[in-house]
Amino acid sequence: MALDLTIATGSSTPIYRQVVDQVRRAVVRRELKVGDQLPSVRVMAERLLVNHNTIAKAYGELVRDGDIESRHGKGVFVAQKRSIYTRAERSRRLDDALETFLGEAIALGIDTDEILQSVTKKLSNFTSQSGRGQA
Amino acid sequence: MNDFVIQTNGLTKFYGKKCAVDQVSLTVPRGGVYALMGRNGSGKTTTIRMLLGLVTPTRGTASVLGCSSLDLTPAVRSRIGYLSESHYVYRWMKIADCAKFQQGTFFRWNQTIFDAIVDHFGLDRSTKAGALSRGERAGLCLAMTLGTEPDLLILDDPALGLDPVARRSLVEAMLAVTSHSERTILFSSHLLDDVERVADHVGIIDRGVLRVQASADDFRERICQWRLTFETPPDALPAVTGVVHTEYLDNEIRLTIANSSDETEAALRALNPKRMEKTGVGLERAVIDYLTTRGSSGSLL
């Protein structure tokens, strides 16, 4: 396991949000697997040199959204993710993500075929790694 | 029990005709880290010195740990750790002597904490305090202050003149203090990077006036930036409530706004921009916008 988070100050993304995003990304990329233990709030705060309340807030959000679970007295572990959003909310979030992605791709002057190809390629990477294959 | 370790009410200080601190009502909750920001000469040090009873206010009141700043007893004082801007030391004392001196002066003394910080800053105990570099002296002062295990730690611009390594040690020491949930730190700083890492609460003071006082999260959530793009930008903007800062680019106007609401959006839309977009603002940007604008609009108290 190599959970190597880095945070940037001065960003418009708050530090707790950077932690949340990076943990989620690590799970999607299978750098973190279900059942893996995360460093405690205190250790993570020391490692990143940030206020422990910031890490507590990030973990709180990850627990609330079902990404990780807190086992009493043992620590924090990556959870089997359940879908907690309604269909409408999922579609709204997907739409947001697509908007950002396509905006960037089109601004770079990439044509439709190329976009579709790279999406397919990336997707096959993800699904072969995670073994979920539910594309 | 009072939930605030520091509470001031209309605290004001005049030096002659010059108002250094203007009706500041500061509330610092117990536990956590409160960062007080402001430009040089904005009144941070004067405020801190009034809290400690070192400067008598012209008007208003201040209480620290439930005791009026004007009559702090030795018992209450010993629970406050104060690190002044200038890091005063007795130059003739060796570092080891500084520890003995503090031990004899304060009710509480924790040699382990003192030793840990002295080692952290890589100081040799037989060195005389007068021979230390600026960063080393800051380390010594920090060790002397934290060794007294204060319930309230007041640091006046502790990072001033520190090199990056010493600064990191300082932040580490501050974070270690707050792992005790009952301990509170009030510090003033210009280093927004450090503030973002450690602060739970922020206050912004500008020309003696406290313009922002909020939790760090709240502060970030309540400040946003609207970016308006125009075919031909208007010459003047109508008054929009909560505008903290306005920046004019070629065809774009960027407004940093506190407490943006539906009314704000409607007012901006009425300008008929080609495109308008709302984005978040980093802590650094938000603070700088507060400190570079004149006026009192967009107060967040």
Image (spheres, coloured by chain):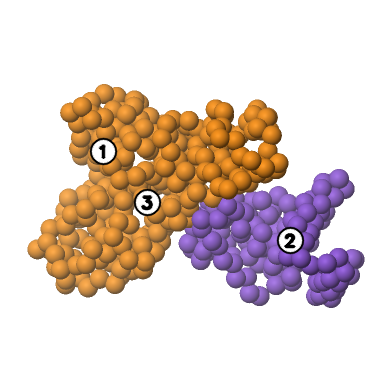
Chain colours: A purple, B orange
The mark nearer the N terminus, 1 or 3, is 1
Q: Measured from the top left, where is residue B123 in percent x and y?
A: 25, 71
The residue labelled by disc 3 is: B190
Residue at disc 1, secondary structure: helix
Foreground residue among B200 and A118: A118
Residue at disc 3, secondary structure: loop
What's the residue type where badge 1 is placed?
Thr
Foreground residue among B16 and B62: B16
Distance between mark 2 and mark 3 Cα atoms: 38 Å
Q: Chain of mark 3?
A: B
Horizontal relation, residue B107 to residue B286: left or right: left
Foreground residue among A97 and A127: A97
Residue at disc 2, secondary structure: helix
Say which of marks 1 and 3 sits in front: 3
Q: Measured from the top left, where is residue B52 in percent x and y?
A: 25, 38
The residue labelled by disc 1 is: B46
The residue labelled by disc 2 is: A107
Q: Chain of mark 1?
A: B
Residue at the extreme left? B92
Residue at 25 percent across and 51 percent down: it is B85
Foreground residue among B89 and B76: B89
What's the residue type where badge 3 is placed?
His
| Quadrant in which residue B184 is drawn | top left
Distance between mark 1 and mark 2 Cα atoms: 52 Å
Mark 2 crowdedness (10 Å alpha carbons): few <14, some 14-19, many ≥20: few
Q: Measured from the top left, where is residue B90 in percent x and y?
A: 12, 58
Horizontal relation, residue A92 to residue A21: left or right: right
Mark 3 crowdedness (10 Å alpha carbons): few <14, some 14-19, many ≥20: some
What's the residue type where badge 2 is placed?
Ala
Q: Chain of mark 2?
A: A
Residues under numbered marks 2 and 3 in contact, where contact means CB atoms less than 8 Å apart? no
